[in-house]
């Protein structure tokens, strides 16, 4: 996820672009850059790091032009660096482009453009865009962009300027956010409303496949057939802080709602109907996979819970033994590692100290290491043999939500890749799981519609001191994550137990009014879970259940039930965690806690 801005008016563009980027830095902070047309040339200034680095660079070389585009980057293709930063230009630097999204077929386009004589400087997918526009440019920037977009597959919000048409800015949106700000004698584009609020509160909210032409006459919006689109102005009434959060009260709630897109982005180009699983540049051969005698999954906190799901999925699909370890304990127990060991380390930030230590230990024993992380260029991504990125986008709230869900998706992708190469399960079964994965984005959006039920339950439990989560099979791993979320942001003591362990001690804690969250999404364990729920109900517990659609019989036993859409039971954890995230959020709100920055916690734990 990145942030883009654009400006055309009668003021100096550079300051307005930087100001706009400062409101979008939550969308990306690996690098920043702007391109301004002045004195008949496209002048590009960009650099790695925070926006402050770009501001220092601009102090040395002020830009005076009144049209330009800007970008703050969260790296997807290519590590954070000056050369990989946006804007990108064509060879002659007559055309400059900023882009938010992923061009899925960029390798094919890059190969074709190279054969046409174009040379590439960066590792990014974005650089194909200015070369494509250049290839089609015949004096009309809008026409060239429209033709270029027809060759592109993936998601994008794009802003383009050209020195040959110094009073024209062209933009287009598909699956990535883009708005147009309308001021007095000036116009703007941006990834999000906060970037323009200091200048205008009148905006157009673009839909997919809509093009924008900004010139001295103002704003024209066109469809893909170049027909004019009539749109109503949306007048913004929020304050700037609320706008930065996309209208949500907190980043955590915003990030919970971004999960359907994060799921889709992480699957993109890796899972497709009728095609083999792709692990980006990871090339584990069939022979190498068959030589693996053990897999370790090592992580901390929420990532550890993703690893527990990963263990179940890999063992079920790939038939390879898996151990899951808390990273801070791993190297102190003298684990048995050799050249036949595959280690998967999971870290949202890619900088978790204990996870890095486990990775380095595995490397000394000649094990192969795959890193699953959300941050391009992070330490684990550099030091591992291979890396699979989770395209969650920047996660601002300390309590992880969308990063966790994309870690789960990554575990399924790895498991399917191993299974395909080993031939450990039937192709028909693999195809069913792939189809289920590809539909999960829509299913996740459906789960978010249950907010009101969860809000009501949150009001009933916000004053409780203790709470218990129950689950069987992979539901137990999800219960652990739900319990952790509640602890993290509401400070309520909670514990997660396997349903079958109740009678071995924990049931002594259940008394009249005790709150219990019970997960019952696994059909083959449903009856057993129902018995466990009855055990706590008999002792006075107040129970809310998370179940699969069609299992409304559970309502006869529990006080309240939330249903997730019917999916293959192996995929249920990706959906069943969402109500638990929302529950933790609403309980925290009821208690007046600092949702995004809970006490004593940090986003990245870089010390042992």
Image: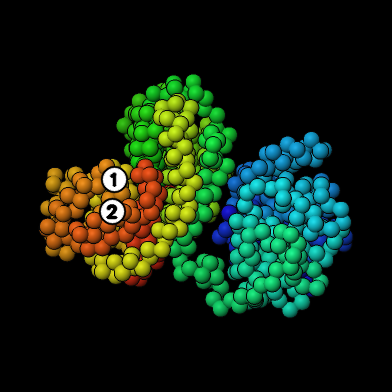
Query: Which image quarter holds the N terminus?
Result: bottom right
Which residue sits at x=48%, y=62%?
A: 254
Q: CA distance from mark 1 to mark 2?
A: 9 Å
Tally the marks. 2
Query: Which image quarter holds the C terminus?
Result: top left
Query: How far across and down, in percent of the image, does residue 429 sit?
Result: 42, 35
Residue 10 drawn above or below residue 562:
below
Residue 318 drawn above or below residue 488:
above
Residue 489 figure quarter: bottom left
Q: Mark 1 highlights which residue?
A: 523
Q: Are marks 1 and 2 in contact (CB under 8 Å)?
A: yes
| Circle number at residue 551 | 2
Query: How far across and down, in percent of the image, does residue 544 sit?
Result: 26, 60
- Mark 1 or mark 2, which has the lower sequence index? 1
**Lateral position of residue 341 relative to residue 196, left or right:** left
Residue 530 drawn above or below residue 284:
below
Colour scheme in the image? Answer: rainbow
Query: How far across and down, in percent of the image, does residue 425 sit?
Result: 41, 29
Which residue sits at x=49%, y=20%?
A: 287
Query: How far across and down, in percent of the image, does residue 281 sit?
Result: 58, 34
């Amino acid at each position: 996820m990145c942030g883009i801005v654009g400006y055309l008016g009668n003021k100096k563009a550079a300051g307005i672009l930087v100001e706009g980027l400062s409101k979008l830095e939550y969308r990306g902070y690996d690098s920043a850059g702007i391109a301004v047309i002045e004195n008949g040339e496209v002048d590009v200034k960009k650099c790695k790091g925070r926006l402050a680095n770009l501001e220092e660079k601009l102090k040395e070389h002020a830009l005076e032009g009144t049209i330009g585009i800007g970008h703050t980057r969260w790296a997807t293709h290519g590590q954070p660096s000056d050369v990989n930063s946006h804007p990108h230009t064509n060879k002659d630097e007559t055309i400059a482009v900023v882009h938010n999204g992923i061009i899925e077929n960029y390798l094919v386009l890059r190969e074709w453009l190279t054969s046409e004589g174009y040379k590439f400087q960066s590792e990014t997918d974005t650089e194909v865009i200015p070369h494509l526009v250049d290839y089609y440019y015949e004096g009309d920037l809008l026409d060239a962009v429209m033709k270029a977009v027809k060759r592109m597959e993936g998601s994008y919000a794009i802003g383009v300027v050209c020195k040959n048409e110094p009073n024209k800015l062209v933009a287009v949106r598909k699956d990535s956010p883009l708005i147009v700000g309308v001021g007095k004698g000036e116009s703007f584009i941006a990834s999000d409303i906060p970037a323009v609020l200091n200048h205008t509160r009148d905006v157009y909210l673009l839909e997919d496949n809509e093009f924008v032409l900004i010139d001295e006459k103002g704003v024209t919006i066109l469809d893909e057939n170049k027909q004019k689109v009539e749109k109503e102005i949306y007048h913004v009434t929020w304050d700037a802080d609320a706008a930065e959060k996309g209208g949500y009260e907190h980043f955590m709630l915003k990030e919970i709602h971004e999960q359907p897109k994060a799921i889709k982005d992480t699957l993109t180009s890796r899972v497709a109907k009728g095609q083999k699983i792709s692990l980006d540049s990871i090339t584990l051969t069939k022979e190498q996979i068959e030589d693996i005698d053990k897999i370790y999954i090592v992580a901390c906190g929420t990532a550890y819970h993703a690893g527990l799901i990963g263990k179940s999925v890999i063992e079920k699909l790939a038939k390879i033994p898996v151990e899951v370890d808390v990273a801070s304990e791993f190297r102190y127990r003298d684990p048995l590692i050799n050249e036949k060991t595959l280690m998967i380390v999971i870290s949202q930030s890619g900088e978790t100290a204990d996870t890095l230590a486990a990775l380095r230990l595995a490397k000394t024993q000649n094990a192969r290491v795959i890193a699953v992380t959300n941050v391009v260029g992070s330490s684990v991504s550099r030091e591992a043999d291979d890396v699979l990125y989770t395209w969650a986008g920047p996660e601002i709230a300390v309590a992880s939500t969308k990063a966790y869900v994309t870690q789960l998706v990554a575990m399924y992708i790895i498991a399917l890749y191993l299974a395909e190469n080993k031939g450990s399960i039937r192709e028909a079964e693999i195809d069913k799981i792939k189809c289920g994965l590809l539909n999960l984005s829509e299913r996740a959006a459906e789960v978010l519609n249950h907010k009101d039920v969860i809000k009501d339950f949150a009001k009933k439990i916000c004053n409780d001191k203790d709470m218990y989560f129950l689950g069987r099979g992979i539901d137990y791993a999800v219960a652990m994550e739900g319990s952790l979320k509640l602890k993290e942001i509401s400070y309520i003591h909670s514990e997660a137990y396997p349903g079958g362990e109740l009678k071995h001690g924990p049931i002594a804690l259940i008394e009249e009014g005790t709150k219990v969250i019970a997960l019952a999404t696994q059909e083959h364990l449903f009856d057993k879970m129902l018995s466990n729920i009855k055990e706590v109900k008999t002792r006075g517990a107040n129970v809310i259940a998370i179940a699969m659609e069609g299992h409304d019989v559970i309502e006869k036993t529990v006080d309240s039930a939330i249903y997730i859409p019917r999916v293959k039971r192996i995929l249920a954890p990706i959906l069943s965690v969402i109500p638990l995230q929302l529950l933790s959020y609403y309980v925290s709100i009821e208690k007046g806690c600092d949702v995004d920055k809970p006490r004593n916690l940090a986003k990245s734990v870089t010390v042992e």
